[in-house]
């Protein structure tokens, strides 16, 4: 904090700091600031960067021992750095602010191509040309059902809509497998919610940026590290309560003491808010509580396998897998980093129900299952990976899932309820608060800037 601001606060010019809250010489371990930001994910970092650079005194309180939150580059294994949270800048054209940021800091990115894909059969046989035509026609049928029917009628689940409109129950087993595969790979993997929970009315409400799908050669952390440089971030500070009833400001209880500020920005993941482990006093407004309970928070997990060499077609980026009957939703998508990075890495994905269930498995069991599926896909034994890293985002107490989705019974407007500030001193950011770009890094980033702007509109002395 600048001395000028301390004086102003002490003289009572600013309602933002509790009086006498900051003693001279206390700066190293001070526990007061003008603004407290809860969470050092991209939303919290974006907000803090903006407020700090304008001259406000901001402390970030982060439960983990690292910054980045759901952006997590894993660099501890024997292989190259790999992103086990977000990987892609979705739509990396220059209107995407994260793409602009990447360019500004000189981040090394490469693109992956969804067209460089192959579909493997899950029962060890090759898909015939006839089967492939069937797959194309069923995918088209589902797209048409969604385009024509999804915005009509009362809300129900995406699965209910698609099953009813495609006469699922009367279709032969291969066609049922293709319908289930499409629901899983096209929708559950993208939106993270189960097709039983995705709202037929709103599951795809939102916007996207134009451009390629870009990944970071040195990991997504280059973005969060750049944003975090020079900020006052207190790691291992788990927030347990936020009190905002007093007229003086906000008091935040953490595992390492109590912090005070004129205002706070809460960037906790929706999954953490849903778990209700953090006490807000007064309790949050009823509309915000309804948004927290009705919007969905799903699961997408990653299984990154480093192999001794590339034994698959290195020109492909996506290796898709049509699970056999009775195994819908299991190991349907793999991305290869062989072409884009030159490394013999395959990353499998599991989302929604199976993605949650498999979190209870040991690492060994999950890796064995992955290897067995890959052997089936290629129709031959494959080498064992030399190293592997797998995620359990739902069991992670500081995420409790991967990202938000529009669940049956929720409405897109509830994201505005989630974002709305309270009493001019508690502000909300995070991917789930962005009605247009929820689920994404760029949505989270923009939500942080939006919360910072809300504070700046209050003309705080600085
Ligand atoms: C597996 C996976 C893949 C993804 N892939 C992509 C992708 O390719 N592209 C894309 O754009 N998006 C992707 N996403 C989504 C993207 O990662 C998120 O939307 C974004 O990172 C969310 O940022 P945030 O700041 O809103 O939340 P977070 O990053 O979750 O930040 C919130 C912070 O709050 C902290 N916190 C939690 N509880 C407490 C507490 N009690 N006290 C203090 N701090 C606390 C957390 O530790 C965390 O650091 C993916 C996510 C996952 C999990």
Image (cartoon, helix red, strand yellow):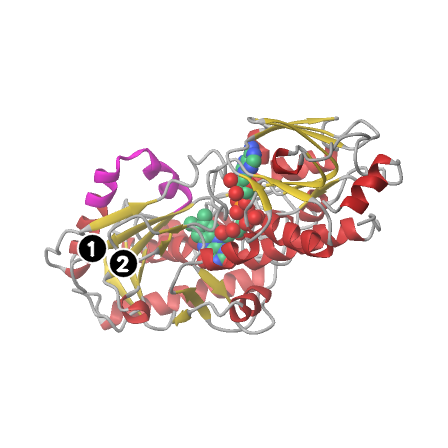
In the picture of the structure, the residue carrying the numbered disc 2 is 346
The boundaries of the magenta stretch are 351-368
Dominant secondary structure, magenta: helix
Query: Horizontally, is 15 left or right of 132 in the view?
Result: right
Quarter of the figure with residue 7: top right
Give residue 20's mark. Answer: none
**Residue at the spot x=14%, y=51% of the render?**
384
In the picture of the structure, the residue carrying the numbered disc 1 is 374
Relative image position of residue 414 (x, y in whole percent) = 68, 45
**Res 398 visible:** yes
Q: Measure the alpha-carbon separation of dots 1 and 2.
A: 10 Å
Q: Are marks 1 and 2 in contact (CB under 8 Å)?
A: yes
Q: Is residue 299 one of those drawn in magenta?
A: no
Relative image position of residue 383 (x, y in whole percent) = 12, 55
First in residue order: circle 1 vs circle 2:
2
SS type, badge 1: helix
């Amino acid at each position: 904090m600048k001395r000028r601001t301390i004086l102003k606060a002490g003289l009572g010019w600013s309602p933002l700091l509790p009086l006498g809250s900051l003693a001279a010489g206390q700066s190293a371990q001070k526990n007061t600031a003008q603004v407290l930001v809860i969470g050092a994910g991209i939303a919290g970092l974006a907000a803090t960067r903006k407020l700090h650079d304008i001259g406000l005194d901001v402390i970030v309180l982060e439960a983990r021992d690292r910054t980045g939150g759901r952006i997590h580059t894993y660099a501890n294994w024997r292989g190259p750095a790999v992103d086990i949270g977000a990987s892609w800048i979705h739509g990396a054209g220059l209107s995407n602010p994260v793409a602009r940021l990447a360019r500004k800091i000189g981040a090394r990115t490469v693109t992956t191509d969804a067209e460089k894909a192959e579909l493997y059969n899950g029962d060890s046989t090759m898909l015939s040309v006839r089967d492939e035509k069937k797959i194309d026609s069923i995918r088209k049928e589902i797209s048409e059902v969604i385009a024509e029917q999804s915005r009509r009628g009362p809300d129900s689940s995406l699965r209910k809509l698609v099953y009813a409109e495609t006469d699922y129950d009367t279709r032969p087993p291969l066609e049922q497998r293709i319908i289930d595969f499409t629901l899983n790979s096209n929708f559950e993997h993208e939106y993270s919610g189960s097709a039983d929970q995705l709202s037929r009315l709103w599951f795809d409400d939102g916007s996207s940026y134009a451009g390629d799908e870009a990944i970071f050669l040195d990991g997504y952390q280059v973005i969060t590290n750049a944003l975090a440089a020079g900020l006052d971030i207190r790691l291992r500070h788990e927030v347990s309560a936020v009190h905002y009833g007093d007229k003086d400001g906000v008091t935040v209880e953490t595992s390492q003491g109590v912090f005070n500020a004129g205002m706070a920005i809460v960037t906790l993941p929706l999954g953490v808010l849903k778990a209700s482990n953090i006490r807000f006093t007064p309790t949050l407004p009823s509309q915000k509580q309804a948004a927290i309970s009705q919007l969905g928070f799903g699961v997408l997990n990653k299984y990154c396998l480093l192999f001794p060499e590339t034994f698959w077609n290195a020109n492909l980026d996506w290796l898709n897998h049509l699970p056999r009957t009775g195994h819908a939703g299991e190991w349907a998508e793999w991305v290869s980093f062989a072409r884009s990075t030159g490394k013999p890495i395959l990353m499998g994905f599991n989302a929604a129900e199976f993605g949650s269930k498999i979190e209870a498995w040991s690492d060994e069991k999950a890796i064995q299952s992955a290897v067995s599926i890959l052997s089936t896909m290629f129709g031959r034994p494959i080498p064992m990976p030399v190293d592997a890293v797998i995620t359990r985002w739902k069991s992670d107490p500081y995420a409790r899932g991967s990202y938000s989705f529009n669940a049956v019974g929720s409405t897109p407007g509830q994201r505005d309820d989630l974002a709305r500030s309270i009493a001019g001193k508690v502000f909300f950011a995070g991917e789930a608060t962005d009605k247009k770009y929820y689920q994404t890094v760029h949505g989270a980033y923009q939500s942080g800037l939006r919360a910072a702007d809300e504070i700046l509109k209050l003309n705080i002395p600085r």
